[in-house]
Image: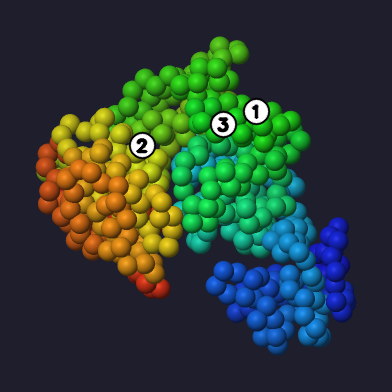
Amino acid sequence: MRLAKIINGLDLEIKNFKDVEVSGISLDSRDIKKATLFVAVKGKNLDGNKFIGKAVKKGASAILTSEKNSTDFGVPVIFTDSINRTVSLMAKNFYSNPLSEIKVIGVTGTNGKTTTTYLLRSIYGSSERTGVIGTIRNIINNEIIHTENTTPDPVRLFNLFAKMRDSGVKKIFMEVSSHGLKLDRVFSIEFDAAVFTNLTQDHMDFHMTMADYRESKEKLFKMLKKDGFSVINADDRSFKHFVEASSPRDVVTFGVRNRDADWVIDIKSLTLDGSMFTITERKSKKSFDVSIPLVGDHNIYNSACGFITAYRMKRRPAEIIEGLKNACQVDGRFEKFYDARGFYAVVDYAHTPDALERLLRTAKRLTKNRVITLFGCGGDRDREKRPIMGKIATHLSDYVIITSDNPRSENPELIIKDILGGVKEKNWVVEINRSRAIKKGFMMAKSGDTLIIAGKGHEDYQIIGNKKYHFDDREEVGKNLKK
């Protein structure tokens, strides 16, 4: 594709313009091939501008940068004040707007994004080709594609969209993170639907304030198409902000406690084998009984997100109910393992105060005897939540094993010291080595107990220092599980 077509519609300053051929776009100088457009991003750890010369030598046909300098690289150099917005628009042009015939449903919130996208995928089943973009993996129909970030950079994102278009995908269910929104990774996308699950403390190392965190997520609802709609959890104390952000588009609210919501949920049963609820459209008084194989009231909220979204998009209620009934276990989301000694081990991704509290309250409600909890907190991330999670874990569990999560560059002992800053109970022990901590949990557990292993869920690695090691909580469970 010619450069002029890629920058069509963009108001940009260009040095040494030539309508060169562009065979690809890349943010990584190591991936540059002949005729690639190199995007020089100045990041937290690396400055792409330092690699422009290297990229040109490798065959880059043009450069996009936010830094002006006097060097003549012999190729067109495009300047922008907002590099992620610009590259998002350029990628959209380069891949010929792959979303023109695909509906995109964006899901945001602190917790529940992954499960909600998977429930939507289950609702549509094999009757329609679908794509999923999110934390665990990206999926094109049944093809699994590795993911690095919940919301990829604009080039990878539009490359995925193009692959989905070429595979006949008609609907994309996409987790949209606060990082992705604040950093404008999704700037050029118009969403057909936006779903809000909840808002609780997370990512304070990045956002610094809850207001900034909320406002970043609100951006999704301002990116709806004119005929788009939003689905909003009216039980969340921030829900009115998201209703306002959606205006003037259609808004559909739901709630268990908020009986003035458009859809009202009545929980019928919660067991370790699944959950049942009734969901009623208040205006029409239409009511539907739903059964899901997932555990906990938080999954009833996630299922309501899926039900209402699909219903609003004209999916038949019977198909929605069947899809929810047949939903698969999501990796590392209340993933149960039964031990022959008479107890369950549960692996869950809960890594925020709210998620941990929901998880433990669910486990406590459904457990005959003791709840034994194992958890840690990640390094180089929000320190404020550490003592809060320590308090929650020790207050809602019978016993707690405090261990390492992904300590990264921080000293694991100091992370644990932060956790203990919120602890008043004496029902805990420290075991820094996560593998030994899991083994300790299995040695403690008895018939009727539930062993909760929280924080990493689907992750198959542990980051210690600047190295990434293979580590999977589920594999560790398998080593200790008696069948």
CA gap between label 3 and label 1 equals: 11 Å
Tell which tag, 3 or 2, sits nearer the viewer.
Answer: 3
Q: Do residues under tags 3 and 1 come within 8 Å of each other at their CB atoms?
A: no
Question: Which image quarter holds the N terminus?
Answer: bottom right
Is residue 293 visible in the rendered image? The answer is no
On screen, residue 325 versus residue 453, left or right, reads right
Q: Position of residue 267 (x, y in %)?
A: 39, 21
Tell which tag, 3 or 1, sits nearer the viewer.
Answer: 3
Q: The residue under label 1 is which amino acid type?
A: Val
Q: Height in image: 391 above or below 286?
A: below
Q: Position of residue 464 (x, y in %)?
A: 35, 69
Circle 3 packing at 10 Å, graded few (<14), some (14-19), many (20+), is some
Instruction: Determine the residue positioned at 49% across, 56% down.
Output: 205
**Which mark, residue 358?**
2
Q: Pick whichever, 90 or 208, lies toward us.
A: 208
Mark 1 = which residue? 251
Instruction: Determine the residue positioned at 55% across, 20% down.
Output: 261
Tell which circle, 3 or 2, labels the residue nearer the N-terminal end.
Answer: 3
Instruction: Determine the residue positioned at 66% across, 60% down.
Output: 154
Q: Secondary structure at mark 3?
A: helix
Mark 3 = which residue? 239
Q: Position of residue 433 (x, y in %)?
A: 23, 63
